[in-house]
Image: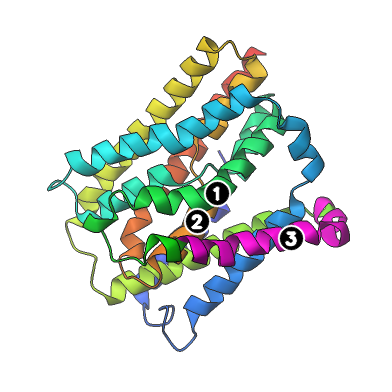
């Protein structure tokens, strides 16, 4: 497999944050907190302009598939996360446990879900619909679900303020993008890589600023290496459960192979592109954000590798 430039950029951002944390701090001289907020708004504006309403309408009638995907994303995952939150108290620190629960309540990813579904020859239109719907639902459901455990985690703003902030910083730019699609949609369709590159650049920036804040606050200790290794195993087990459940549920419901593929890849994935900006809104400039994002970063890398192999296996069988 080719080296992933995005993952290399994240690793470089983390290394730079540890080497010189004062440069990228949220409230530093470069005002990186404001820069990341503007970058997030730009990305969601481009996403809104890139999504075709016609393709969304054509896939909206496949309600059984949509119900399965959204139930996995916002019911199965949070239940697992809630169990881990309580079961591992005293085993993992509150920031990492909160990060794992945050991973579980984050929406599904768009780009890689659609790409994997296309590679496996599944229902691409349904994948686009579900991934986009998941992202929109996550703007409300993620902070609401997070309130179940937030009393034991990092300090955050009240839920109503979180949802208001998400709507203002994420949903409003998305809606504006939809309104502007008639003017810039064709250009974005010709240059789809623009949205992907903007996504990745903003995520790297969010990770860099979060790790700078965490390093300045002295949140990293020697015991975190073992905790992160344990979290890697935990994230791998979570992905395995999600893949098994979505596959068995699809077959029990009698879905077609194309729909099963869409359900497996949309229902098992978690979005770093949506999760990192929402985490930035919810946790603000909290130095704990660097630790809270660790499970989502790990899960993102694991799901890319595992789902790429799975997509090729689906393709070879058809």
User: Which one is in front, 264 or 158?
Assistant: 158
Q: Any magenta on residue 175?
A: yes
User: Where is mark 1, residue-wise?
Assistant: 4
**Separation (CA) of disc 2 from disc 1:** 6 Å
Position of the N terminus, as image quadrant, is top right
Position of residue 204 in the picture relative to residue 57 (left or right): left
Which residue does the image show at 32% across and 34% down from the upper left? 80
Which residue does the image show at 36% across and 51% down from the upper left? 146
- Return the disc, 1 or 3, that comes first in the chain's sequence: 1
Q: Which residues are magenta?
A: 163-189
Could you say whether the residue bearing mark 2 is in a helix, strand or loop? helix
**Percent coordinates x, y for residue 182 in the rendering:** 87, 57
- Say if residue 160 shows up in the picture: yes
In the picture, residue 183 is in which quadrant? bottom right
**Separation (CA) of disc 1 from disc 3:** 29 Å
Which residue does the image show at 79% across and 60% down from the upper left? 179
In the picture, residue 253 is in which quadrant? top right
**Percent coordinates x, y for residue 307 in the rendering:** 52, 32
Could you tell me if the residues under marks 1 and 3 are in contact, i.e. CB atoms within 8 Å?
A: no
Q: Any magenta on residue 48?
A: no
User: Where is mark 2, residue-wise?
Assistant: 8
Mark 2: few, some, or many residues within 10 Å (few <14, many ≥20)? few
Which one is closest to the eye, mark 2 or mark 3? 3
- Return the disc, 2 or 3, that comes first in the chain's sequence: 2
Could you say whether the residue bearing mark 1 is in a helix, strand or loop? loop
| Tally of marks | 3
**Separation (CA) of disc 2 from disc 3:** 30 Å
Which residue does the image show at 35% across and 64% down from the upper left? 289
User: Where is mark 3, residue-wise?
Assistant: 177
**Percent coordinates x, y for residue 94 in the rendering:** 22, 55
User: Which one is in front, 253 or 30?
Assistant: 253
């Amino acid at each position: 497999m080719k080296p992933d430039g995005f993952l290399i950029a994240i690793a470089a951002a983390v290394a730079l944050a540890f080497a010189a944390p004062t440069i990228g701090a949220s409230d530093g001289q470069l005002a990186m907190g404001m820069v990341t907020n503007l970058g997030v708004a730009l990305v969601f504006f481009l996403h809104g302009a890139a999504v075709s309403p016609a393709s969304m309408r054509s896939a909206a009638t496949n309600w059984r598939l949509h119900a399965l995907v959204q139930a996995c994303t916002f019911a199965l995952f949070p239940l697992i996360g809630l169990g881990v939150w309580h079961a591992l108290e005293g085993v993992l620190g509150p920031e990492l446990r909160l990060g794992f629960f945050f991973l579980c309540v984050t929406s599904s990813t768009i780009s890689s879900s659609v790409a994997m579904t296309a590679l496996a020859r599944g229902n691409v239109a349904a994948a686009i619909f579900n991934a986009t719907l998941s992202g929109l639902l996550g703007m409300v459901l993620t902070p609401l679900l997070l309130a179940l455990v937030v009393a034991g985690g990092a300090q955050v703003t009240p839920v109503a303020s979180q949802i208001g902030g998400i709507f203002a910083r994420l949903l409003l730019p998305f809606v504006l993008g939809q309104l502007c699609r008639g003017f810039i949609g064709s250009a974005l369709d010709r240059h789809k890589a623009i949205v992907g590159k903007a996504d990745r650049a903003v995520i790297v920036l969010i990770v860099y600023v979060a790790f700078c804040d965490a390093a300045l606050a002295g949140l990293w200790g020697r015991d975190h290496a073992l905790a992160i290794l344990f979290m890697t195993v935990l994230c791998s087990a979570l992905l395995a459960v999600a893949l098994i459940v979505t596959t068995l549920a699809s077959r029990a419901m009698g879905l077609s192979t194309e729909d099963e593929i869409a359900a497996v890849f949309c229902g098992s994935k978690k979005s770093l592109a949506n999760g990192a900006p929402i985490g930035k809104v919810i946790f603000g400039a909290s130095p704990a954000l660097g630790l809270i994002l660790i499970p989502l970063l790990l899960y993102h890398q694991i799901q890319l590798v595992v789902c790429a192999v799975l997509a090729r296996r689906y393709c070879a069988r058809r």
